[in-house]
Each structure stands twice: as C-alpha cells, then as structure tokens.
Image (cartoon, rainbow, N blue to C red):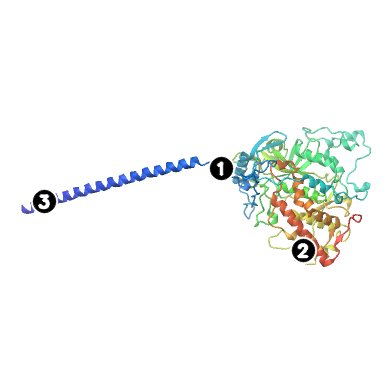
C-alpha cells in the first residue's frame, strides 16, 4: 500500500517536471521564431534599399570584346567615338589566338553558333540571288586606321614603278589574237556551254575592246609579268569577279582543301576559296605549317602585297559575299559537291565538298546564315592554250615532323643550287629570292613548288600561285623563309630599291597596304588584314633590309643590277 502511494507520487512529480519543460521549450521556440521573423524583415528592407539604389544609378553600355567587334559586320567608315573630354580613345585591340587544338579540328557547333550571333549583333544579311549585300551596323568603339589613298597613288607614281621596260616582241606575249578568223570559226560550239543556260552569246573579233575583261587579262600576259602596272582593264576585271552573276560552280580537282571554280555569263572563270576561320584568328603555335587551314583573305592580301612590291606575279584576287544556296547549291552540276550540303544546328547553310583533307562535316564551310565570304582569283589561261611547268623549289620544306630538309642542315647549300640549271644562269635565282621575300613578309611557309609558262622557257618570271596559308601569324616571324636570301646573298636592285622606298615614312609598307586593301569590297564588312598583321609587315621589312645589309658587309656587292639606267 505504502509502496503504491509512493509510486503514484513519483509519477505525479515526473508529470509536473515534464509539463514545466514543455512550457519552457514552447517559450524558447516562440522567442526563436520571433527573432527569425525580425531578421527576415530586416533583410527584406535592406534588399529593397539596395534595389532602389541600383535603379537610380545610370547604366553605361558595355564595350564589345575585340574579337566580337571584328567578327561583327562593322562599318569601317564610322568615326571613332570620343570620350567625355573630347579625346578619341586609343585602339585597345589585342591579337586573337585560334582555339584549334593540335589536330587542327574545328568545333563546328560552337563556330556556327558564334557566326549566327555575329550576324545578329553586327548587321543584316540579305540574300539577293546574284549577289549578297551586307548592311553594316556602326561600331564606333574600335575602328581601323583610315586608309591614305594619296600615299598609295604617290607610290605608284614614283619613277621606280614607271621604269621603261625593254620593247616586247611578238614572241614575248603569251597569247595573240588571230589577224584573220574564218566565218565558221566565229560560230564554233567551243564558246557554248553544255546547257547554254545563263551564258551570254559571244561574238569575238579582232577588236580587243570588244573582248570581256578576263580575255583581255589573258591577252595582256607577257614574258615579264601578268599584267601592266597601269592596265585600265584591271578595274573591270575586279568588278566582274565581285558583281557578275555566277552561272556555274563546280569543285576544283586536286589540292588538299576545298576550292571551287566559278563561271560567269561571259565565259570567264575564277578560283573560289571560302572563309574557314575568323580573319583575325592566329595560327596555333602547336600546329605544323602543313596542318594549317587556307585563308580567303590571304589570297587577297597576297595579290595586293605583290602589286605594292611591283612584282605583278600574283593573279588578281578580290573578295566577295556569296549566297551559299542561290550561287552554289542551286546552280552546281557537280553531284559529289551537291551531296555535301546541309543545315547546321543553328540554321546556317553549310557544305564541305570532297578533298584530301578538311572535307568533312567537322570542317564544313558555313554561311551566316547564307552569306559566305570568299576570295575570287582570276583563272590563268587554260593549260591547253598556255601550258605551265611546275618546278620543285630548292628550298622546299621536308613536310615531316621529324626530318629536316637539306638546306636546313648544309650551310653551303646555295653553292650547290648555283651550279644546278636553271639557277646557274639568267635571273631564275633572283626571281626565287623575290618570291622568298614576298613569302617572308606575309609569313607563308607553304611554298613547295612554283610555276612558269612553258612558252617562255627559263627566261621569264615565276608565277606566285597558291598563297592561302599566308598571314597566319602576326606575333611571330619565321626567319627560315628568308633562307634563299641569307644563304645566297643575292638580290635584284629594283627589288632592293622598292623595299628601301617602302621603309620610308612617306611610303610606309603598312600604310600603302592598308590603302590598297581598302579598295576591296569585303572591307565594307571588316578589314581584310588586321592592324597587327599590317604592323608585322613593317617589322619584317626591316628584317629583310637588315639581312641585305649583313650580306653587303660580308660579301660586298650582292646586287644584281636589272635597272642600269636608273640613277
């Protein structure tokens, strides 16, 4: 009995203790909840105050990144925007570096998305059937330096560029017009295409003025150069390449990369090289020279540089915006090419063709969404009319990752070359050195062969063809390209005089190149060569003159005087 009462009283005390603890716990919870509620209110008040302060602060637009600005379809004629103090901002551009890996593969999905966004941000592309026009949108933050056409005109008016040459004989012309043509030859079917659709009816006669520009260009080729310095037909030829209707597009056989042959209504043709990468992308340092992509702007830049140097050995090349659908896909008769067209994930029209390398969906060429930049180079006369001979360059590279060429290991290699025909007589050796100087200035390491017209034998100029791998790097020079000059220590006087002229402030090479390139239609989209590439030209020119000076100190007279009448 006593024990049961004791147990009841114990339970009562336990219940009272538990009730007291529950009451204390509920009190603490109420206090904690009240504190959290106050903290939440305080945080909301601070957030509202911060938001109001941000809305009251005026926002300034973000400046575009250099790469984005150049990829956008910027207006090069817009004046630089001045700051609040009335001073024009300095050019903050930095060289871009290609993001390609060692294997040279492109990330096409990222590229097409990037290209699509560039069109949306930079300009409006309108497909117009025959041509594609771009309406540029002004981007005043970053603009190229204004081209000085006056200096270019002054350069071409200099006596060095207007020296009288030796009179040309009949055998010095590559092609000649027949003095008399039979009536049945005028109506020969050789001037008619297979389908005749899109081609104009040609009625050729002895009057050169009635010939189309491409034919006048062919008739103007002689023993010493491809075209005359003051040939008025050059402008008409460039106009044909940029604006005439394209009636046929087929893939060119041979070569490692994609190239097309475009035909015009007047039976003229051009070599089409598409844009494969941003013109400011610098070649990856981990890539070998034979793994690089060809560039459309390199072909155009090579023509202008060759002309500025006074060589006139590169066929005229201009830039053009081509509609991938209406000017290639819809008119091609090349079935193999037609099978390679597709639309990218972002809706851009793409194709890749068939070739030895870089012709696959991973390396496709894509429009934006249909407009595609390309170089259009004038085709030389057909081989059946004017056969050409291909020569292996004595300074050809090994095209191997582990082996060196003979000229890279032998210091007296040029002595062997001088004893080997055709370099043992005539101007062939200094012609080759001219080509090496051109290649060094534009950083072209891919000169394994060169060509000449068979009609002229060994007494003629070298044709500077296939310059697509030039202008790949601007931050690094490749001194091995100058090996012919350094090892042979021989140079034309006319070449040296022009190089020294282009080193003067009034005829700075970068200045006249900027002016010359500004006349190309693609400059309305973006500069064909960026400022770092133009600055590299001046730097490399100084290097060439330094090598010549070293040769003169070592050997004395190293100049081949091809202009004895020049003072």
Label 3 with label 1: CB-CB less than 8 Å = no
**Distance of mark 2 from mark 1, alpha carbons?**
58 Å
Question: In this figure, which residue is indicated by the disc labeled 1?
Answer: 60
User: Relative to the observer, which residue lies in front, 422 or 59?
Assistant: 59
Number of disc labels: 3
Q: Residues within 10 Å of mark 1 (few under 14, many from 20)?
A: few
The x and y percentages for residue 533 are 71, 52
Residue at the location (89% across, 56% down)?
A: 562
Question: In this figure, which residue is indicated by the disc labeled 3?
Answer: 9
- What is the quadrant of residue 561 in the picture? bottom right
Compared with residue 519, is residue 390 higher up or lower down, i.e. above or below? below
User: Relative to the observer, which residue lies in front, 388 or 561?
Assistant: 561
Question: In this figure, which residue is indicated by the disc labeled 2?
Answer: 407
Q: Which mark is residue 3?
A: none
**Distance of mark 2 from mark 3, alpha carbons?**
113 Å
Label 2 element class = helix
Label 1 element class = loop
User: Relative to the observer, which residue lies in front, 215 or 72?
Assistant: 72
The x and y percentages for residue 124 are 65, 36
The x and y percentages for residue 24 are 23, 48
Mark yes or no: residue 405 visible. Answer: yes
- What is the quadrant of residue 204 in the picture? top right
């Amino acid at each position: 009995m006593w024990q049961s009462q004791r147990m009841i009283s114990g339970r009562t005390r336990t219940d009272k203790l538990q009730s007291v603890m529950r009451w204390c716990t509920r009190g603490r919870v109420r206090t904690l909840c009240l504190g959290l509620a106050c903290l939440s209110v305080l945080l909301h008040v601070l957030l509202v105050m911060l938001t109001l302060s941000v809305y009251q602060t005026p926002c300034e637009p973000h400046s575009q990144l250099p790469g984005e600005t150049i990829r956008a379809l910027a207006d090069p004629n817009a004046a630089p925007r001045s700051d609040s103090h009335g001073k024009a901002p300095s050019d903050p551009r930095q060289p871009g570096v290609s993001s390609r890996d060692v294997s040279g593969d492109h990330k096409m999905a990222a590229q097409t998305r990037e290209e699509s966004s560039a069109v949306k941000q930079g300009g409006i592309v309108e497909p117009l059937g025959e041509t594609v026009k771009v309406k540029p949108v002004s981007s005043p933050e970053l603009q190229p330096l204004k081209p000085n056409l006056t200096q270019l005109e002054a350069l071409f008016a200099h006596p060095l560029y207007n020296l009288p040459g030796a009179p040309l004989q009949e055998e010095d012309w590559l092609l000649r017009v027949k003095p008399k043509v039979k009536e049945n030859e005028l109506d020969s079917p050789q001037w008619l295409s297979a389908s005749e659709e899109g081609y104009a009816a040609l009625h050729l006669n002895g009057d050169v003025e009635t010939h189309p520009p491409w034919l006048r260009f062919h008739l103007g080729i002689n023993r010493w150069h491809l075209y005359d310095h003051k040939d008025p037909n050059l402008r008409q030829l460039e106009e044909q390449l940029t604006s005439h209707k394209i009636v046929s597009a087929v893939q060119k056989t041979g070569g490692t990369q994609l190239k097309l042959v475009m035909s015009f209504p007047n039976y003229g043709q051009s070599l089409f090289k598409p844009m494969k990468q941003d013109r400011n992308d610098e070649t990856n340092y981990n890539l070998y020279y034979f793994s690089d992509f060809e560039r459309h702007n390199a072909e155009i830049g090579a023509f202008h540089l060759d002309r500025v140097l006074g060589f006139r050995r590169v066929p005229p090349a201009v830039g053009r915006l081509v509609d991938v659908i209406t000017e290639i896909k819809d008119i091609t008769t090349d079935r193999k090419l037609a099978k390679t067209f597709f639309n990218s994930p972002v809706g851009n029209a793409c194709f890749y063709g068939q070739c030895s390398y870089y012709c696959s969906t991973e390396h496709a060429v894509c429009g934006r969404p249909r407009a595609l930049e390309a170089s259009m180079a004038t085709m030389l006369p057909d081989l059946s009319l004017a056969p050409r001979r291909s020569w292996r360059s004595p300074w050809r590279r090994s095209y191997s990752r582990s082996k060196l060429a003979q000229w890279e290991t032998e210091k007296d290699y040029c002595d062997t070359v001088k004893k080997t025909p055709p370099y043992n007589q005539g101007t062939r050796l200094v012609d080759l050195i001219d080509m090496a100087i051109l290649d060094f200035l534009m950083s072209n390491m891919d000169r394994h062969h060169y060509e000449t017209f068979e009609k002229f034998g060994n007494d003629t100029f070298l044709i500077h063809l296939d310059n697509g791998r030039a202008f790949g790097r601007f931050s690094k020079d490749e001194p091995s390209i100058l090996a012919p000059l350094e090892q042979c220590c021989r140079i034309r006087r006319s070449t040296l005089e022009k190089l020294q002229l282009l080193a003067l402030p009034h005829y700075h090479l970068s200045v006249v190149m900027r002016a010359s390139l500004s006349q190309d239609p693609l400059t309305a989209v973006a500069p064909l060569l960026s400022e770092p590439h133009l600055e590299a030209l001046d730097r490399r020119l100084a290097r060439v003159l330094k090598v010549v000076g070293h040769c003169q100190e070592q050997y004395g007279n190293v100049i081949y005087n091809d202009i004895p009448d020049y003072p």
